Image (tube, helix red, strand yellow):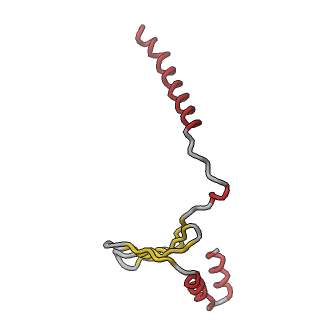
Amino acid sequence: MNAAWKLAWALPLVLAIGVGAMLLLRKFLVPVARQAGDDQPRMVVRQSLPVSEQTSVHLIEVDGRDYLVVESARQAVVQTLSSAAIEHSHSRWRIGPAWMRRQYEARVR
């Protein structure tokens, strides 16, 4: 009976000390808060296209710059895209009905 009584008060005491330690560590070891302009993600995958079973092409944007990434089983190639190439890729959707162009423009933005 004496051992059960010791365990009855020791277990909650140990749990309380553990929770207190966690709260103190969380308060003092919180990572540095992001700056106000850092709310946007740095890397966004715009589009992915599987070319074959082992090769795929990805269009990504990192910090406002566009890159074309070609990955395969053997290697990966990263190519920077110029703004002229990006404008040319968007201009191909000028054909078609007006409702289709509006839908595409809304999806791109």
In front: 82, or 39? 82
Please say if 55 is above or below 12: below
The residue drawn where x is 62% and y is 76% is 108
In front: 1, or 68? 68
Number of numbered discs visible in the structure rendering: 0
Residue 94 in picture, x, y percent from top left: 63, 89
In front: 76, or 104? 76
Please say if 88 is above or below 50: below
Specify the farthest residue to the top: 2
Specify the farthest residue to the left: 74
Indicate the quadrant where residue 97 lies: bottom right
Asked if residue 87 lies left or right of residue 70, the reply is right
Indicate the quadrant where residue 101 lies: bottom right
In which quadrant of the rendered image does the C terminus lie?
bottom right
In which quadrant of the rendered image does the N terminus lie?
top left
Residue 100 in picture, x, y percent from top left: 64, 84
Please say if 21 is above or below 59: above
Please say if 13 is above or below 2: below
Residue 45 in picture, x, y percent from top left: 52, 69
The residue drawn where x is 50% and y is 25% is 15
Residue 23 in picture, x, y percent from top left: 57, 33
The residue drawn where x is 50% and y is 77% is 80
Specify the farthest residue to the bottom: 95
The residue drawn where x is 41% and y is 75% is 70
Asked if residue 56 lies left or right of residue 38, the reply is left
